[in-house]
Amino acid sequence: MRLSRYFLPLLKETPAEAQIVSHQLMLRAGLIRQSSAGIYSWLPFGYRVLRKVEQIVREEMDRAGAHEILMPSIQPAELWKESGRYDDYGKEMLRITDRHDRAMLYGPTHEEVVTDIFRRSVRSYKDLPLNLYQIQWKFRDEIRPRFGVMRGREFLMKDNYSFDLDFAGALRSYNAMLLAYLKTFRRMGLTAIPMRADSGAIGGDLSHEFQILAQTGESAVYFDAAFEDIDFLQDELDVEQLKALYAATDEQHDPASCPVPPERLRSGRGIEVGHIFYFGTKYSKPLGATVVGPDGAEIPVEMGSYGIGVSRLVGALIEAFHDEAGICWPEPVAPFRLGLINLRPSDQGCSALVAELEAKLARAGVEVLVDDRDDSPGAKFAAMDLIGLPWQAVVGPRGLKEGVVELKCRRTGAREQLSPDALLQRFAA
RNA sequence: CGGGGCGUAGCGCAGCCUGGUAGCGCAUCUGCUUUGGGAGCAGAGGGUCGGGUGUUCGAAUCACCCCGCCCCGACCA
C-alpha cells in the first residue's frame, strides 16, 4: 500500500477531547474518528487492527470448539421481559420503538437471544456441550462514555455462551474458556491476569475478569509472580492451579491478609479486557431452555457466558505498547508489518529500489506500507514512528550509494544497515 | 444524574471582562528553493464565531433558553 494513495489522516497536534494516551494516539495516527459521545468510526488503519484482533479471538474460539454465529443487534423487548431483565437493566439499555409501536432494544448483551435460539433447536442432552459465539457490535448507553474506544457506548465484543447438562460440564466449559482467553491475549503480546470477580448484573457465582498489564491501566492490580513464569502458549496448563493463584484488584486486595509472600507479590496497573461467568440456569429456567436427559427428564441447561472487548482491546494494546513518539504495535496485530520510507521520491534510484522492494515483499505476502509522499525526511520519520509499524526500512540517497537500506525496529529503536537482498530475506522468509 | 469546564477555519488557540462586523500557529492549495528526524520564502483559499430568542443604532462579545463535547463523582466489557 502506498501512503500517497491511502486514507491515513494524521494529526500533528493532540485533539483537546482526548485524555488518555491511547485515545490521543488513535486520533492522531488516523485509526478512528468520533461520531458522537462514545461512538466512533474506524478508519482503514484502525479497522485493520480491529480485524486482526478479531481474527486472533476468532481462531482461539474456534480452536476451543466454539461455533461462530451472528445474532441481531436489535432485539425484541419480549425476550427480556421473559428473562426478567427488561425492567432491571435500567437506562444503560437503549430502547427503541418501531413503526408498529413494538418495543425493541439495541442489544447490550445476548443471553436472551442465544437462549432463545437454543431452546427452539436443541432437545437432547446428546447435543451437549454446545458453545456458540459471535463478534458483534453492542450498545450500552453509559452515563459517561470516556477514554475513546476504551469506554465507548458502542463497542465490538466477542461474546460466547456455553450450554451443558450439569455443573461438572459447565465447569469444564468455563475452564476451557479461561485457558482460551489466556492464550488469546498472549498471542497479542499481552500479559493477562485472571482475577476472581463479582459477577455483577449478569448474575452467577463463578466469574473471572481478565486484566492486562499496562502502566496507564485504570486500576491497580496485585498478583502472584507465578503468572509471569507461565508460558500460556506452550505449557500444559492446570486450570485449577491457575485459578488458585492469587490475583486481586486494589478494591479486593488486603495487604494484611494477602497469602502471597512479599517477594512473590507483583503489582501493576490493569485494564479489563475480558470477563467470564458461570450462571447456571439463570436464563435457561425462565426461558425454558431444557434438554431431555439420559433418564428422560426435562432439565434446564447449565450456562455460562464469556466476553472479550474487541474494540476496547485496540485501545488497551496502545496503552500497553507506546512511547513518546507514538504507537509500537506488536507484530500479530500491527496494521502493516513493515513501513518502507522512500526518503527522496524525486530520486530515480530511490524510487526504483523502493518499487522493487515493494513488489517483492508484496509477492511474498508481507504487509508493507510505503511512504512515497513528497515530504521532508523528518516529517516521514515522525509519521512512521507515530503510526508504530513494528519495522521501518529507509531507502535514501545516502544509503543507496553504499548499496544499503536502513532497518529500524520500532520497539527497541535498534537500527542496522543491510543490503536490499538481506532485507528481503529477513521479511520474505 | 449531581458538580465543574468548554464550543471562534480541518487541528491547537487568542479575541469576550470593557459591544463597532474576526485573528494567530499548524494543516490545505499554487510557485520556487530545499531534502537522513515534524524545511524556507512568496502568494492563495477556507468562518451562518454551536443554535435560538432578547437587549442595542450595532452582538463572537451582554441576558435568557436549548444543543453538543470534555472533566470529577456514582456506574461499567
Image (cartoon, coloured by chain):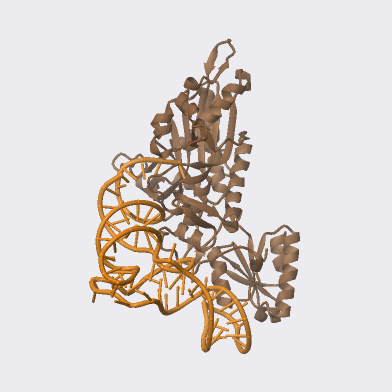
Chain colours: A brown, B orange
A149 lies above or below A90: below
Whether residue A305 is visible to the viewer of this picture, yes or no, is yes
Residue A231 location in percent, x, y? 55, 45
Residue A90 location in percent, x, y? 39, 35
A352 lies above or below A73: below
Residue A12 location in percent, x, y? 49, 69
Quadrant of the snapshot with the N terminus of chain A: bottom right
Residue A366 location in percent, x, y? 69, 59
* In the displayed structure image, the side of residue A389 where residue B25 appears, left or right: left
- Give the mark count: 0
Whether residue A231 is visible to the viewer of this picture, yes or no, is no
* In the displayed structure image, the side of residue B7 where residue B1 appears, left or right: left
Residue sitting at 37 percent across and 43 percent down?
A249
A29 lies above or below A256: below
A367 lies above or below A228: below
Picture quadrant where residue A255 is located: top left
* In the displayed structure image, the side of residue B56 where residue A85 appears, left or right: right
Of the pair A419 and A231, the residue shown nearer to us: A419
Picture quadrant where residue A211 is located: top left
Of the pair B73 and A221, the residue shown nearer to us: B73
Quadrant of the snapshot with the C terminus of chain A: bottom right
